[in-house]
Image (cartoon, grey):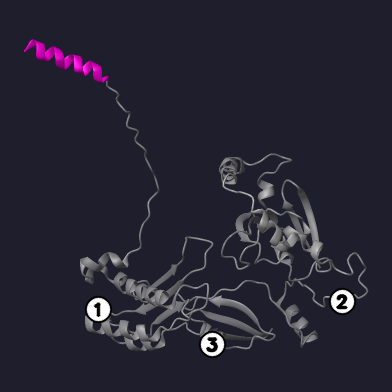
Amino acid sequence: MYVRILSVDLKIVKSLSVSDDSVPVDTTLLVFIREYSKFRDTKAMCHAGDYGACIVSAIFKDKTIAVNSCLVLVLTCDRWNIVTSEGLGNKRNGYHAIQTALAPDLDAFKGFAIDAHPSMVKDIQDIEELYKIKSCRKDKMPCVRSLEDGHFYKVFFRIEDIFKIFGENPNATYILNGGNTAHETVGAQVHVLESFYKKKSLYLWEFLNLDMQHKIIYSVVLPSLDDIKYVCRFYKIMPRAQNARGHVDAGFLFTFGDDGKVLELSNIIFCGINMHFMHAKQTEELVNGKSIFDEKILKLIIEKLHVELQPDHVLPDYSPEFRKILAEGLFYKFLLSIQPERVDPYYRSGGTLLERGLYSGTHNKVQNVFIDISIINIYLNLCSLCK
């Protein structure tokens, strides 16, 4: 099965074709760009889509989006138009205005670089020169054995064809590359096909415990919620606005009556606490049927949540204390945002989101005024003579 990639680099390569015979099926777009197409400007850092060093521009279906090339399999890029930084500008065709504008700043940093001390150069060997220290005994010799990959890649246009492959390969492992969506906060349901004629509907917490062997996620259904009856909020706290892993994510769904009482079992969900924690179930049961605007009840709710949240300590995550306080703060922020008119004005702003306007700056130059001191002395002397 051949996958056609149109113009990996718009200004250098016009078209490329790749198949599961020429590259392993788990080859990412990043590896293909760097190792097969030999375009080295696209970098790799975390291999998790956090830092953004691997981002390229992808054009398909008349849309242009930014893609983390380390997370996309190259065999899924059929009819994609990929633009790397070489496509923006290069030595052969000329550089882009952005690249030329950055050049002076990058050259300025070169002045801070100095050569290492000679003793350090002698003691430390460059990994690229490792072959000089200990070379391979079979360097440049032909391989006497041949190992086949055993993987294959298929594109399906009908559901029944997928189950046909399952029947032909009952013990084979597989990966379905079709994306995934999960919205536990709003009570989404996942529709799973166990066969072409059998479909099962599951909530996300049920889906997490389901054995997906030879099953397919067919669709995800989001329920329709009344804005008057339901209050739903989402929060995501990150070190920066994009290309960063969130410290703590939170989602809350409450149903309120006219008197402020919680009518149904609510959803209090956190991500980033520990790998086994999603629902604050004890807190959800405590708030059911109670008015959260009662100060005594609100205090009990916060205390219960404080006991229930038990963050783990896995690097590079922030400390458990920080993430616990952050999660409690997000829940308190949600409570303040439900009915601001019933909140003390002193605390009311805690429930709103900061609105950042357009950044601007001004610089006022004060012109220095130089006065000849000798002229002032002559003037003072004349004044004294007149007196």
The amino acid marked with disc number 2 is Leu
What whole-number distance in Å separates the C-alpha atoms at marks 3 and 2?
41 Å
Residue occupied by mark 1: 293
Question: Residue placed farthest to the front in the image?
Answer: 119
How many C-alpha atoms fall within 10 Å of the one at disc 1: few (<14), some, or many (≥20)?
A: some
Report whether residue 288 is seen.
Answer: no
Residue visible at 44% across and 75% down?
Answer: 319
Report whether residue 317 is seen.
Answer: yes
Total labels: the figure holds 3
381 drawn magenta: yes
Residue occupied by mark 3: 206
Residue 139, given in percent of the width and then of the height, sits at 88, 66
Residue 292, given in percent of the width and then of the height, sits at 28, 80
Residue visible at 59% across and 76% down?
Answer: 219
The amino acid marked with disc number 3 is Glu
Residue 97, given in percent of the width and then of the height, sits at 60, 40
Residue visible at 31% across and 79% down?
Answer: 256
Looking at marks 3 and 1 on the same chain, the residue that comes earlier in the sequence is marked by 3
Give the position of the C terminus as an image quadrant: top left
The amino acid marked with disc number 1 is Phe
What whole-number distance in Å separates the C-alpha atoms at marks 3 and 1?
32 Å
Looking at marks 1 and 2 on the same chain, the residue that comes earlier in the sequence is marked by 2
| Foreground pick, 153 / 89 | 89
Q: Mark 3 or 2, which is nearer the eye?
A: 2
Q: Which residues are magenta?
A: 372-387
Residue occupied by mark 2: 147
Q: Main secondary structure of the magenta part?
A: helix
Q: Quadrant of residue 135?
A: bottom right
134 drawn magenta: no
Q: Quadrant of residue 63?
A: bottom right
